[in-house]
Amino acid sequence: MLMIQLYDQDMKVMMVMLVMMMVMMMMVMVMMMMMMVMMMMVMVMIMMVMMTVVMMMMMVMMMMVMMMMMVMMMMMMVVMVMMMMMVMVVMGVMMMMVMMVMVMVMMMVVMMMMMVVMVVMPCVCLMMMMKMTVHFRVGAPPVIDPVGVAFPKQTAVRLAWNLTLSVGARQPQNQTLLNITNPRPGDWFIAVHLPQDDGKIQQKGLPSCSYLFQPQMLIRRSVDTPTLLPNVPITHTLSSVHTAGIFKIFVPEFSTEMQVSILSCAVGGVAKPKCGLSLLIGSSSLGRDSRLANNCSETGPCSSSVSAPPWDTWVQVAVETSLANITVTFDISANYTVGCKPQSSPADFNSNFTVTGGNNSSAPNGSSSPSPLRNAAVARGDGACVRTPAVFREETDILSLRFTVADGNLSVPADPPTLMTFDLNSPATSGGTLNLHLSLNKSSVIGQFSSVRACLTPSAPVMPLNTSQPCATAFVQGYSLSVNSTVSDVSLRIPFPEVSMWYLSLQTLCNSSECSNVSAGVSVYVNVSACIDDCGSYGSCRLLRTHSYMYAACTCSAGWRGWGCTDGGEAMSFSLQLQSVLFLTLSNLLFIPPITLALYRGYLPEAAVYLYNMFFSTFYHACDQPGVTVLCIMEYDTLQFCDFLGSCTSVWVTIICMARLQDLFKYVFFMLGTLLIAMAMSLDRHGLWNFLGPLLFALITMATAWVYRGVKRRQCYPPLWRRWVFYLLPGVLLALIGVCVYVFAETDGNYLYTHSLWHVLMATSILFLMPPRHKHTQPWGWTHALCGYRICKNQKEDLYSVS
């Protein structure tokens, strides 16, 4: 038992020792772990230090890299800035050179366009086929209607005979021979015109298609023309050489009928009833019924009768044969009948007289031209045959005559007729318009009145007047008028009346067979005026002269056309007229910005010129308007001269101002240029070179000044490229576009738009082209102008001491 106890004690000791050993081992392990921890901490610290050092080194390196990069970037930026500056300088120089080249090219283009127009236009004219219309008339200028307009109301028109000539590439010259056999004696008039143009406004000075019309007249006269005396036969022979026989007979005044007869004829000396002869009475005037023809194909005597032959003139008679290569001999005789012939003229022109006389069937042999019918009443033996009131002739102006009836209100009976004579035998009156107005006094009608018939004819009257008698003489168709209770006023206008004595026959027609006590009071107004109704409200009457001959014509406006400016088929409406005047006048207000800019920059003379141009251009276009929208503060010619002078002077002073000359030379150029421009405008204000001449001279002056200043400074002038890009180039472009619009684009239809655009472009170009203010010039503002500006500025002040 004791042994067991010992054993338990040993076990305890061993356990204690084990425990101690375990504790020691644990302590050793703990220490080892602490050492390991400490080593790890040391290592961590070392690593941290190393990492810190590395990071610091890396940061330092990064900072160094960044600094190097920044330095490099700064260097690159400096290099880029330097390169950009060099590029900008090079680009500025190149831009300036390009601008100068472009300006020169554009000016050369404009000049080339003008040269091309000058060279190509003749070739274009040769390629075009143009038709020229030639009109002929004897006794007065031809009445023509080239574009088919409507003539004024109550106007009698008989268009002249014409022919058309073609000129073109295949036929550059047209030589046409017009043969007029046996022409009517007197003055022959020729009028020629081209077709209607396209409305393009052709600037004077530029070449255009021109056509030369050169008429030549060759006359072959027949000498020793046999004269046919009343009832005196003449024997005449026609041969193979002379195929026509020409005779003349004088028809005195008051002749009512003329007869020409071929009494007998023989062929080859053998009498035959038919000889193939024909009678031609009258002269050729290229008009209808100018000659009366009678073919003598009947057996026996051949006779031709002419009613109402022309008075106080020679009448031509021609006899022709249709047989060839034979000899024809014939006897010819003529006679005329005088119906009423005055015996004397009264001394009192305020009364109608009846002069009785015999009935003369023929005039004495070799009778000369008797005095014309004036201021007398003529009668037959069985009663009065015509009443002739006194008519006074008064010349009031050029192409202006007035005929006054002494009795004023005429009493026109049914029998005899009333005859009035109007002397238009002077060529000075044929270039106007003959006006006739008849007015019936309804209160003066007596008896079974129907109407008053009137017939106006040249050369010879028509009597009597009835429903069966036409208003026509032997060779001329007259003008018939009538007034009655319904239509009491009638008028007649005859443009370019024939040079002759004109006769007005008046006679009352009644409703019954008994017309002895029927009469009516009629007022007659006859005059010759230059134009029809003075061309109305939309035209002006112009007196034109061709060599020594003067005639009148209407110049129409606002789209109105015709002889009296009464054809309104293409007339401008009032709204369009108002639009035209507003466009052309208000567009000048764009000169206010250049005026303001010139005042601000100290260019006072230039501002005054622009103001002058704006004022007179506005009121010139207000006065130059067609139609009723017209306002003239001065004479039209004065306004036109001032407008042209202001426009050209504005361009002149602008370019001279751009040259930057010294003040002395600048003002000398201003005054001398303005005086020369005024002289040129007074010579020919519509000439294109009167505008382009000063422009080119001013450009040469400016270019010379700029080149001199650039060579002296050894740099381009103006030196700033911004001045070239943003000011000079736009200004030159606007000016060149304006010149091209003004020269090449204006037509009658677009004038109000293109010319207004010309105003806008010129005013805007001045804004860009005006040079900047001088360095030592103060702005001319309102405050400075009102408070401190002095017109007479002293350059230096002198001090005076008064003792």
Image (spheres, grey):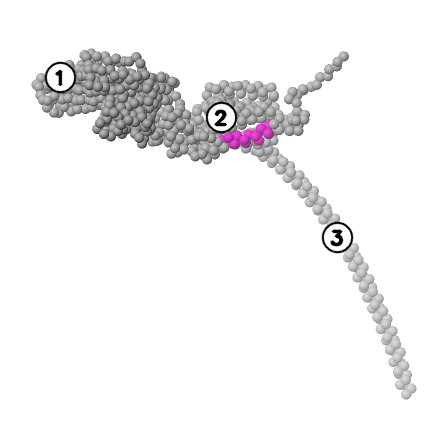
Give how far apart the Cα atoms at labels 2 and 1 are. 74 Å
Residue 232 in sight in this render? yes
Q: Quadrant of residue 133?
A: top left
In the image, 250 versus 517, the foreground residue is 517
* Residue at screen point 47% across, 34% down: 579
> In the image, residue 265 lies at what x, y percent?
11, 19
Above or below 473: residue 571: below
Q: Which residue is mark 3?
A: 55
Residue furthest left in the image: 270
Tell me the crowding category of disc 2: few under 14, some 14 to 19, or many 20 or more residues within 10 angstroms, Cα based: some
In the image, 452 versus 129, the foreground residue is 452
Secondary structure mostly seen in magenta is helix
Q: What count of labels does the image hold?
A: 3
> In the image, residue 306 lies at what x, y percent?
19, 22
Q: Quadrant of residue 95?
A: top right
Q: Nearer the viewer, mark 2 or mark 3?
A: 2
Residue numbers of the magenta segment? 584-598
Q: Which residue is mark 2?
A: 632
Q: Does the CB distance between marks 2 and 3 fall below 8 Å?
A: no
Q: Nearer the viewer, mark 3 or mark 1?
A: 1
Give how far apart the Cα atoms at labels 3 and 1 are. 153 Å
Quarter of the image that includes the N terminus? bottom right
Question: Amino acid under label 1?
Answer: Asp
Q: Which residue is mark 1?
A: 331
In the image, 332 versus 253, the foreground residue is 253
Q: Does the CB distance between marks 2 and 1 fall below 8 Å?
A: no
* Residue at screen point 40% across, 33% down: 571
